[in-house]
Image: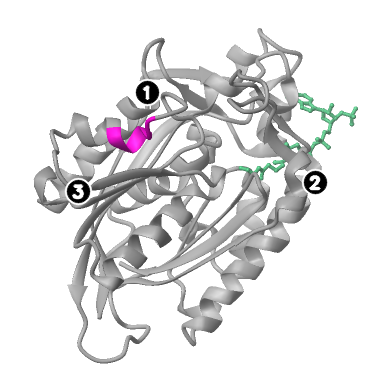
Amino acid sequence: MFRSLVTGCGAYLPSQVVTNADLSKRVDTDDAWIRQRTGICQRHIAAEGEMTSDLGLAAAKEALAQAGVAADAIDLIVCATSTPDETFPATATRIQYGLGMAGGAAFDVQAVCSGFVYGLSVADNFLRSGQASKALVIGAETFSRILDWEDRSTCVLFGDGAGAVVLEGIKQDGPANGKDRGILSTHLYSDGSHHDALYVDGGPSSTQSVGHLRMEGREVFRHAVVRMAEAVDAALEANGLTPGDVDWLVPHQANIRIIESMGKRLNLPSDRVVVTVDRHANTSAASIPLALNEAVGDGRIRSGDLLMMEAMGGGFTWGSALVRW
Ligand code: UT7
């Protein structure tokens, strides 16, 4: 039996920053509305010609360097994205090529904002079973390419970016317990009946075009709070842990009000909740690894800490991952 240890993380944000004030020149909105309703102050937007694989590759390189692992030692790349460079091949294979790798398997996972938790779960299961030994899990998105820049209810909410982690399968002697380092559990859920609340109105098989993101914000908000709470409860119960055991909430970054309500549910003081939504906005599958990278990089998250990750996105999809750092 193997367990997946996170041995490195990395991130990349495009250099161009767009503030709320910048957006108010484009659509009928203002800084006060965006800050009060979402907590967002600015977002990073990819440059012309800068693609999801470019963002993901930069994050992956940083994660590999931090782990001290050579690209050739990786035998699995899972890239979570809903904004691939092309309809096919998988963005993961572009990243694999960019890393100079000729071996291993690389594919994308598409679970929108829950993509990183889904990708982590897929890679964890590969490592646990011994089918792979070292994996890169990447969340990389260029949501700016699928936004309707005339729709103020959605275009102010999203940004571009990428985050990545290196997972290494380590042999585990005896049954797992909550004190083990590594991924303790992942819980994944979906419910396709909520398609119309959050989707992109295009695709190869429907319109033969890329389409634009459409969202019933209030409906998504209502479900997000309930569904993510259920996923968090499932993770704690499966590991025989309580909210008091959790050191850090590393949540999907869609809205500060959702993040705060999840923090309260875990009885965590606000300084134990990692928040990047103010500077990154919602970067979909990239938001959790971007937040993780920031809190690890500045020394907040330390070895032995218990991290709760949770996310919810289009589909609906949602889930949680409990990780002992
Ligand atoms: O990552 C995937 C998961 N996504 C989420 O978790 C997002 C969940 N939803 C949300 O975060 C929130 O619902 C939003 C931030 C999207 C919207 O906040 P809200 O408090 O639910 O606002 P609302 O949609 O109910 O809109 C309130 C008002 C409306 O005006 P009326 O109808 O009350 O006159 C909107 O037209 O705010 C108006 N509005 C805006 N005003 C200024 C909507 N967008 C804007 C805007 N600037 N950008």
| Of callouts 3 and 2, the N-terminal one | 3
| Of callouts 1 and 3, the N-terminal one | 1
For residue 247, side relative to residue 73 (left or right): right
Q: Which residue is drawn at 36% across and 17% down?
A: 50
Q: In this view, does 85 lie above or below 302?
A: above
**Membership of 91 in magenta stretch:** yes
For residue 74, side relative to residue 6 (left or right): left
Give the quarter the ligand 1 occupies.
top right
Dot 3 amino acid type: Gly
Q: Residue 104 carries which label?
A: 3
**What residue is disc 1 on?**
14
Mark 1 Cα-neighbour bin, 10 Å: few <14, some 14–19, many ≥20: some
Q: Residue 213 lies in what quarter of the image?
A: top right
Q: Can residue 297 be seen in this view?
A: yes
Q: Which residue is drawn at 70% across and 56% down?
A: 191
Q: Residue at x 51, y 18 (%)?
A: 18
Bounds of the magenta span?
A: 89-93
Where does the image place residue 272, in percent across and percent down from the top left?
Answer: 47, 61
| Of callouts 1 and 2, the N-terminal one | 1
Main SS of the magenta part reads helix
**What residue is disc 2 on?**
219
Dot 1 amino acid type: Pro
